[in-house]
Every structure is written in C-alpha cells, then in structure tokens.
Image (spheres, helix red, strand yellow):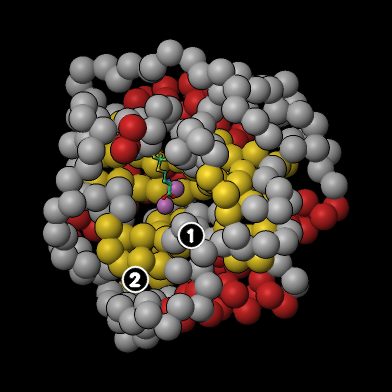
C-alpha cells in the first residue's frame, strides 16, 4: 500500500454536539471513574449501538472499485444521521471520519482516492460520539474473492476477539484478556501486535485502562462491573512489529504481511462481559 490523495475536509452540521477536540485537535485528559456511573453506561450503550449500525452500513458498501474516501463519506453521513459526531474527525488531527486499513495496514489508515481491489482485505473502524460519550467498533471485510490465507487470518482474528471477551470476569486482572488472545493466535502461528491496545472508552475516546492483546503482566487493573473498555486485537500473518508511515497515522506490519482486526466496546457485568457494539 501507499498513500493516495485525500478529499477536502468534511463538515459537521450545527446541531451535532462535537467532542472537546473537534475544533482544536487536542483531546482533554480528564480523569473519569473506571466504574462508570449509570447515566454514562446508558450513554455508552447508545453510542455503541450507533457505531455498530454505522459499521454495518459502511461494511455493506465494500466491493472492488469503491474508494476508501467513498466509505469515509458514508461513515460521516451515517454518524450524523444518528445525531452523532464521527469521533476520528480531528482527533489528534486525524483528517477523516473513519479509519480504513487495507492489507498490511494494521490500523489508523487514512481514507483516500485508492479504489479497493478484488482480493484486498479492509478494516473499517467506526467510532461515534453521541450523548457525551464514544462507542468504538471495527471489523475486517473481504473485497471480492480473497485468498485462503487471508480468510483464515480474518477468522482467527475474530476468534481472538471473542476469546478475549470470554476472558472478561469481574475480580480478574486485565492481563487475562491478552493471555487468552495470545494463546489462540500463537497456536495458529500468528503474530499479536503490541503497540496498539484496547482502551477505556466513555467520555474520553481513549482513557484507562490499557488493554494489551498479548500477555502483559503489568496490566494489573482488576476488572469490575460497570467498567467500559474496548478489546481490539490486531493479528498478523508474521511479525508483531510495526512501522509508521511518515503521515504519522498509518501503521503497517514491519514485514509487510497482511493483518486483520476486530473490535467491540464492552461493559463488565457481574458475570462477564456484555458486548455493547451491537446493532439495534
Ligand atoms: N478507533 C480507533 C481505536 O479503536 C482509534 C482511531 S483514532 C483516529 O482506538 F484518530 F485514528 F481516529
Ligand atoms: Co478502540
Ligand atoms: Co476503533
């Protein structure tokens, strides 16, 4: 992959309440309780549902010949249609409303004028800011006919996400999640990206806790009912190491082999996890 041309900035209509960073590019680092108050949980539920709906609509538009910029336009419009702000837009200066990560791009790919090609795989990462909080979800989609190795990669990556979710249990450390993901990935000979992690999500797009996708003994936060965070494993056909493009956003595998990702926003419950990023 290489960088294409970006379209001009997309506008958000008056009446959509923007997050703090929309004008400046710089998010505040306010302290939020990790166990969210009930009204925050209710709002994360609504934002997450909206994000899941937007992801389904954008994902349905994936086909050979569609540019990632066209997918960005759909994501932008679908967020606004639900009364939400597309969280990526101007988050730390990110220029678009959706992240589109193709083939060896791990995450944070910037939509541009490149048309998807038969055989590509593309991750679409949608985050919606609604009712004062964010909901964050992504999935990797095949473009036309994809080779068997890529199909397996996507399937294993989804299994890694679901194994990570199954490891969520109140009273247990966050490191259980990465342990479960890593066990599944390594059994198949896959790599687990370390540089990008799951994260607390509520009023802040990215806050504590860190949720590593590999086993990291330093992830000692004990899971408690009422926490909301993402799990979003990035699994590779080869190395876990990444390289950044000089655009400051696009992260690619160091060996240029393919990588896939799936993400949900979760609520820790009394028994385990509830997936909030499900369409209504
Ligand atoms: N949605 C991504 C995540 O899962 C973050 C995107 S940040 C952006 O955490 F600035 F690139 F949009
Ligand atoms: Co996320
Ligand atoms: Co995301």
Q: For the point 76% across and 29% down, which residue is it?
A: 117
The numbered dot on residue 195 is 1
Q: Residue furthest bottom?
A: 171
In depth, the one of 121 and 129 nearer the eye is 121
**Image coordinates for residue 189, horizontal then vertical, percent:** 75, 71
SS at circle 2 = strand
Q: Earlier in the sequence, mark 1 or mark 2?
A: 1
- Residue 191 in the figure: left or right of residue 202: right
**Image coordinates for residue 158, horizontal then vertical, percent:** 62, 60
Which image quarter is the C terminus in? top left
**Image coordinates for residue 85, horizontal then vertical, percent:** 31, 31
The quarter of the displayed image where residue 31 is located: bottom left
Determine the CA span between mark 1 and mark 2.
24 Å
The quarter of the displayed image where residue 221 is located: bottom left
The numbered dot on residue 268 is 2
Q: For the point 38% across and 33% down, which residue is it?
A: 94
In depth, the one of 216 and 86 nearer the eye is 216
Q: For the point 33% across and 32% down, which residue is it?
A: 93
**Image coordinates for residue 233, horizontal then vertical, percent:** 54, 61
Which image quarter is the N terminus in? top right
């Amino acid at each position: 992959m290489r960088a294409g041309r970006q379209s001009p900035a997309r506008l958000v209509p008056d009446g959509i309440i923007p997050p703090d960073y929309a004008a400046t590019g710089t998010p505040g680092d306010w302290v939020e309780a990790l166990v969210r108050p009930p009204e925050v949980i209710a709002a994360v539920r609504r934002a997450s549902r909206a994000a899941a709906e937007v992801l389904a609509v954008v994902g349905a538009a994936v086909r050979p010949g569609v540019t990632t910029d066209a997918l960005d336009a759909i994501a932008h419009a679908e967020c606004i249609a639900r009364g939400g702000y597309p969280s990526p837009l101007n988050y730390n200066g990110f220029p678009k409303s959706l992240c589109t990560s193709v083939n060896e791009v791990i995450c944070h790919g910037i939509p541009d004028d490149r048309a998807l090609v038969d055989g590509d795989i593309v991750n679409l990462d949608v985050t919606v800011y609604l009712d004062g909080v964010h909901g964050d979800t992504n999935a990797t989609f095949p473009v036309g006919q994809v080779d068997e190795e890529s199909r397996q990669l996507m399937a294993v990556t989804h299994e890694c996400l679901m194994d990570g979710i199954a490891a969520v249990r109140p009273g247990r450390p966050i490191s259980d999640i990465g342990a479960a993901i890593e066990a599944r990935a390594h059994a198949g000979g896959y790599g687990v990206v370390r540089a990008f992690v799951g994260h607390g999500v509520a009023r802040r797009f990215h806050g504590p806790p860190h949720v590593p996708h590999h086993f990291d003994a330093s992830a000692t936060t004990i899971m408690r009912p009422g926490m909301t965070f993402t799990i979003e494993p990035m699994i590779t056909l080869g190395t876990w190491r990444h390289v950044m493009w000089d655009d400051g956003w696009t992260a690619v595998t160091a060996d240029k082999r393919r990588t896939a990702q799936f993400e949900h926003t979760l609520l820790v419950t009394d028994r385990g996890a509830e997936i909030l990023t499900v369409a209504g």
